[in-house]
Image (cartoon, rainbow, N blue to C red):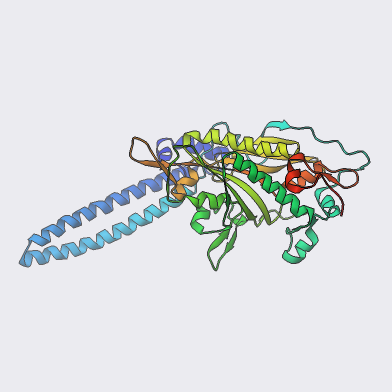
Amino acid sequence: MIDLRLLRDDPDAVKASQRARGEDESAVDRALAADVRRRGAIAEFERLRAEQKSRGKDVARAVGEEKQALLAGVKELAEQVKAAQAEADAAAAEFEAALRSIPNVVEDGVPPGGEDDYVVLKEVGAQPALPEGLPAWRDHLELGELLGAIDTERGAKVSGSRFYFLTGVGARLELALLNLAVARAVEAGFTPMITPTLVKPEVMAGTGFLGAHAAEVYHLEEDDLYLTGTSEVALAGYHADEILDLAAGPKRYAGWSACYRREAGSYGKDTRGIIRVHQFHKVEMFSFCRPEDAAAEHRRLLELEEGMLAAVEVPYRVIDTAAGDLGSSAARKFDCEAWVPSQGAYRELTSTSNCTTFQARRLGVRERVEGEGGTRPVATLNGTLATTRWIVAILENHQQPDGSVRVPQALRPYLGLDVLTPA
């Protein structure tokens, strides 16, 4: 959640963030009003509770009829204290809900607007020319079927639409890609993690995925557990309610997991192939750091993502995502989009988000403040280092006229092949 001091001291900054996101500014006023009610209710409860304690001492000293009279008054006061406590609890719950309804405050410089209002920061690599002898680009599914690498027909037979099998060299290619990502993460100082893919409601809510995007999340009602759409969720909860020692620098993790997304609201979009699917694998970087180090850590994650894209030799661009497309937790997000020849367009392969202290406040992840004897929330950041969708860009950008696909040099040690040939 956002910093309460910022809400109280500079509500105009929070309202400006809401405007940039296209969100309701009045949510700020509602939260402030709820804060006033909460503080008033708590003060009244504490006043009555103090009076109750004082009268209790009077009762202990009194005797006879005086004591009986005092007891009657104390009993009535006890009912008032009980009612005041209920009122304080209700006001606190109302305020908590109002505060949680406000997404993270965006960083200065984030483009305002929605999904289409991003700013292109740079383009890297030349878009490939159509190989001689090909009348048109083969898309990744056609290539995957030629190679015996992707089987969406049987995926649908077994599990329904937007499911698939990676078979033969397809499975090997994904494993090679993810292993390369893990190796690079370890080299960069990240601890590799195999994470749970089922999490408790408080962890899913703590990361901000049960707000506007709750429809994307699979929920197992009988167990009251959620399937994660990214290992970011489990990694964010890894240090919940802990005090971290960040004196030696950020704590960095690289989570490998299966990911699950309902893709609600995407009916008719990207139904061909494996661009938009319900299940996939991903290696996700996650950092806990001091708030003042978050911007530098964000740039570091982006550099690592760009290094992976360069390693698989695909043209890409980096965009500064607009405020309305950030999601509730991110204060800033950079996407890396790879060129997909068959579509003549860039498509997202990675994103990295600076969530500042938003998630840590919800999950109780803190660090000790040196010399002050207190604690403060840490910053959290995440970034994708590789995922199943990368196969789309790799197959299409490295295709050859005979249906084979050249394997990028960096993947060859992990795959054991220089070329993928039709089955």
Quarter location, residue 110? top right
Dividing the picture into quadrants, the one containing residue 134 is top right
Most foreground residue, 236 or 99: 236
**Image-based side of 300 in relation to 38, left or right:** right
Q: Is residue 388 visible?
A: no
Q: Kindly identify the residue that appears in the image at 62 percent across and 36 percent down.
A: 302
Q: Which one is in front, 63 or 298? A: 298
* Residue most extreme to the bottom: 222
Question: Position of 70 compared to 81: left or right?
Answer: left
Identify whether 238 is placed above or below 374: below
On-image quarter of the C terminus? bottom right
As drawn, which residue projects farthest toward the right?
133
Where in the figure is residue 405, as x and y percent of width and height? 83, 45
Residue 99 % position (x, y) = 45, 47
In the rendered image, the vertical position of residue 158 relative to residue 111, given as above or below:
below
Q: Residue furthest left?
A: 64
- The answer to whether residue 382 is visible is yes
Along the line of sight, the residue nearer the viewer: 390 or 203: 390
Q: Is residue 235 left or right of residue 146?
A: left
Q: Position of residue 264 (x, y in %)?
A: 66, 56
- Against 395, residue 166 (above or below) is below
In the image, taking residue 213 as reference, residue 265 lies left or right, namely right
Q: Residue at x 59, y 55 (%)?
A: 228
Residue 121, above or below 269: above
Total residue callouts: 0
